[in-house]
Amino acid sequence: MVKILIVEDDLGMRNSLRTLLEEHGYQVFVIEQFENLFQTWKEKYHEVDLILLDIQIPHINGELLLKEIRKESSVPIIMVTSRNSELDEVLSMSYGADDYITKPYNPSILLLHIDAVLRRGKQETQTITYQDITLNIGKCQLERKDKIIPLSKNEMQILHYLMKHQGRIVSREEMMKYLWDSEEFIDDNTLTVNMSRIRKKLKEVGLEHAIETKKGLGYLFL
């Protein structure tokens, strides 16, 4: 059974989310005490399959909590917030969120987002090697000798797709359809932010020029 952690301080919203998810077959955990949230996640909920994380929570901004979790885990995280701000969305994605949904939301749409994020994560454990770099898909990380660079789910999916199509230009439209599985989930800003993060991580393992942008065409993994 898929395990989902809800980090939401509004009691009514938290209970509604819990009921919705349990009715659709998920095992649900909720946060009720918001002090030392990162440590609570690390000690009790490190093995959940997905986190629904509100931005406005007590004691720590949700985006900062996301940033801390990303240092240790690539668990899928969907930001759920009442703040309809493009800056919040870009910032959340830059910190490693896998998706972003604004309140009030249609419950069916939220379930579609959850399903899409979870399906993207259902990759069988495998690796792809390029030069002396390994993309470990099962562990969502780049490996070079003793150096390990963690990737978010989106980063892993993008890099995996580009590496599989090495030597061929992949258009932005093709990449977004692959990522979201439906035009309903296409987000140009999300792809741009993720590509920027991927390039920085490739630079850490000595592959800063591995991805070339072809203006007006897309991306080429050399």
Image (tube, rainbow, N blue to C red):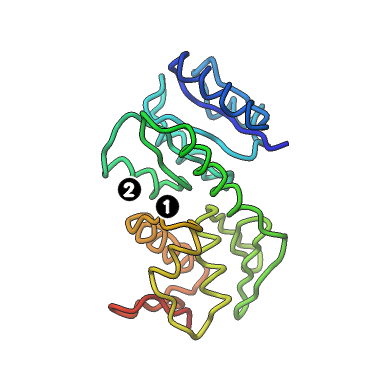
Against 71, residue 128 (above or below) is below
Q: How many marks?
A: 2
Q: In the rendering, at what x and y percent does residue 174 appear?
A: 44, 70
Q: Up-down: is 220 above or below 86?
A: below
- Towards the viewer: 149 or 161: 161
Residue at mark 1:
185
Amino acid type for the residue under numbered disc 1: Phe
Q: Which mark is residue 177?
A: none
Q: Residues within 10 Å of mark 2 (few under 14, many from 20)?
A: some
Which image quadrant is residue 138 in?
bottom right
Q: Residue at x 68, y 37 (%)?
A: 2
Mark 1, Cα crowd under 10 Å, few <14 / some 14-19 / many 20+, is some
At x 64%, y 40%, the residue is 49
Q: Which of these two is toward me, 203 or 176?
A: 176
Task: Give the percent coordinates (x, y) of residue 66.
Answer: 46, 38
Q: Amino acid at mark 2?
A: Val
Residue assigned mark 2: 90
Q: Earlier in the sequence, mark 1 or mark 2?
A: 2
Quadrant where the N terminus is found in the figure: top right
* Percent coordinates x, y for residue 181 in the rendering: 51, 58
Say whether marks 1 and 2 touch (CB < 8 Å).
no
In the rendered structure, the answer to whether residue 114 lies left or right of residue 184 reads right
Instruction: Determine the secondary structure under disc 1.
Output: helix
198 is higher (above) or lower (below) than 121: below
Judged by depth in the image, the label closer to the viewer, 1 or 2, is 1
Q: Nearer the viewer, residue 167 or 174?
A: 174
The image quadrant of residue 165 is bottom right
Residue 70 shown left or right of residue 141 in the figure: left
